[in-house]
Amino acid sequence: MNLNTSFHLRDKGVSNALMTGEVPRHRWYFVKEGFSPALVEQAMKTECVKKGELVIDPFVGSGTTPLAAVSSGMRAVGIEVNPFLRFLSAAKLTQVNPARLGDSASVVGRGLLRPSPSRLETYSTFGEGNRWNRWLFSRDVLRAFEGALNHIRMVPTRHRGLLMLALLSAAMDCCNAVRDGKCLRYRKDWRDKQRGVDDLVSAFSRRVAVIIEDLKTAPLRDADATITQGDARRSLRERTAGAFRLCITSPPYLNSFDYSDVYRPELFLGRFVDSNASLMRIRLRTIRSHVQATWSTPHEEDFGHLYRECMDKVRSSQTQLWSSRLPLMIQAYFEDMRDVLMSLRECAARNASTWMVVSTSAYAGIEIPVDLILAEIGQAAGWYLREVGVLRYLRSSGQQMNGLASGDHVSVPLRESVIVLQTQPSSSH
């Protein structure tokens, strides 16, 4: 199976969200793991998707696919297991009267100046005084946030989602830590530069102003979109609302990254979860792409010759892996993705296509060609493979070196690719 290293979207920045910082609605909340709306627009153009046809994303994340789809007149369905990200995706699709939203924002703004005790003050690392001696928010910020939550209940229901999004965004602007790869990294000199109520008020005002501006300049009229919370492995068949014409998605990468844990602050602040136990329930419903949760043991392993070749190498290097569970994680990941690809095939229209953005990985210096393995799995599930196009090459990840002696370090170039599958042979496309 050959890679298309000259793919027309290579090095165009479409596989990441860096280009969305100034794009209306997309800019309301930055999600690093997202992709560019330009990818969705190019896919819809390439596949000649017509207005009113259904576009889906079973790993909807920050909502790039449905927002780009409805902006072009298509119907959209998104599925997301993380309740905060599901909320974010739905909020971006909301249209209300900008002036009236501004009035409601004033009510919530008054709540920021009426602080109320927050249970998060003494929970885990959210507030000061814990055994780790580091905390995400000052007590003033947590109490002001709680006061604003109390006032959100006073505004019209149709305004609450947008104001909650602005409030969560503002709170993260005032967090002592920032996202850095797979974790939250505390800011330099954070103890001496903690944000307070005035900072939260200013951040909330800025965030609301951006939303109001986009509601005016990029209104959504009669957007036909549904964003539901669910596990794509289980609920895809019942959530698509008919046969889809195009699927554009990016499932979790096989990089041992716990996508639910990194949004832990938003999940607790927004009351999407109320305990570590409820957070764990979400983590156990995600694709098994990390070892930070004790998920069920995989059983299937018939995923093609490329999978067998790399797994033989991984298992023979067991002592060099940073976790003994990595071989099971790799097996579980492809077992999950096989189920997703099979479900997608069952939900596809006669002339449907799927564009799936993935990244390769490496452990102990052994490449896992995720894109090519998934292409083989897709064909076994009844899809025709059109191509695997390279979107960009990535710098080497530290995970591929962990466990190796210094003299054994091998550079394994990682790449992001898009797998393009279709329901009919290329000659009839």
Image (spheres, rainbow, N blue to C red):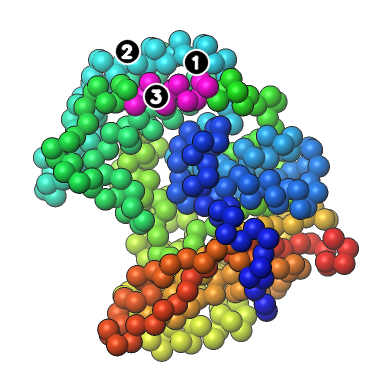
Tell me, yes or no, if residue 232 can be seen here: no
**Pointer 1 local density, CA inside 10 Å: few below 14, some 14–19, many at least 20:** many
Residue at the image position 74 percent from the left and 43 percent from the top = 54
Secondary structure under badge 1? helix
**Among the 4 quarters of the image, the one containing residue 250:** bottom right
Q: Quadrant of the C terminus?
A: bottom right
Instruction: Measuring from the top left, give residue 121's x and y in whole percent.
Output: 19, 34
Secondary structure under badge 2? helix
Name the residue at the right extreme: 428
| Dot 1 amino acid type | Leu
Instruction: Measuring from the top left, give residue 282's x and y in whole percent.
Output: 42, 50
Left or right for 168, reference 39: left
Q: Specify the label residue 110 is tagged with.
A: 2
Instruction: Measuring from the top left, give residue 290's x and y in whole percent.
Output: 40, 64
Secondary structure under badge 3? helix
Is residue 90 on the magenta stretch?
Answer: no
Mark 1 or mark 3, earlier in chain: 1
Q: Specify the label residue 101 is tagged with.
A: 1
Q: In the image, which is nearer the foreground, mark 2 or mark 3?
A: 3
According to the image, label 3 marks what residue? 206
What range is drawn magenta here? Answer: 203-213
Instruction: Measuring from the top left, give residue 312's x and y in whole percent.
Output: 48, 87
Dot 2 and dot 3 residues touching (CB under 8 Å): no
